[in-house]
Amino acid sequence: MNPTVIVVLIIIVCLLILFLVPNIMLRRAFAQVIGIFLKNNITHERAARTAEELKLNKKSYFISQMTTRDYKPAALNALIENGIVISTDDGKLYLSEQALSNSPLSKRIKLPKRYGA
């Protein structure tokens, strides 16, 4: 096989990995974040908790440089922007199961089974 073809194929594979792996990891993080809310039964305003209490906040710069990337804070921000996770006036968060069931996200990712149901 021609060396040029091999180099082109390697570049294509690397580009696919570069774009697909973060997408897969973010999908996995969506399921993990939703699972955290369901496991702790944080589905209404009275049960709302802060991101720090749920351990979904961003890590410090130093710690983030020493560990693998955590996609859960990015997934949480996306869920908040889409109205699936709702923030109260005092900064606490809870999952809107109705918004989740109406979202196309519920069909695109593998959601965890409802805990305690």
Image: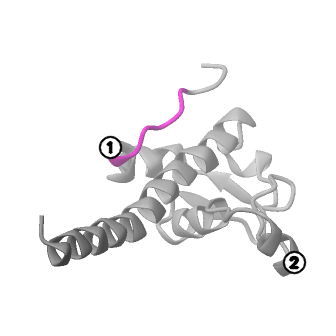
Which element is circle 1 on? helix
Q: Which residue was labeled with disc 2?
A: 62
Q: Is 29 in the magenta?
A: no
Comparing labels 2 and 1, the label whose residue is closer to the camera: 2
Which quadrant of the rendered structure holds the C terminus?
top right
Decide: is 117 above or below 13: above
Q: Residue at x 85, y 76 (%)?
A: 60
Spot occupied by residue 17 in the image (x, y as percentages of width and height):
38, 64
Q: Main secondary structure of the magenta part?
A: loop
Which callout, 2 or 1, points at the residue further toward the start of the chain?
2
Spot occupied by residue 44 in the image (x, y as percentages of width and height):
67, 46
Spot occupied by residue 18 in the image (x, y as percentages of width and height):
41, 70
Q: Which mark is drawn over residue 94?
A: none
Which quadrant of the rendered structure holds the N terminus?
bottom left
Q: Which residue was labeled with disc 1?
A: 107
Decide: is 30 above or below 116: below
> In the rendered image, which quarter is residue 8 located in?
bottom left
Foreground residue, 43 or 80?
80
In the image, which residues are magenta? 108-113
Badge 1 amino acid? Lys
Q: Residue at x 29, y 69 (%)?
A: 10
Decide: is 58 above or below 93: below
C-alpha gap between disc 2 and disc 1: 36 Å
Badge 2 amino acid? Phe
- State the residue lying farthest toward the top: 117
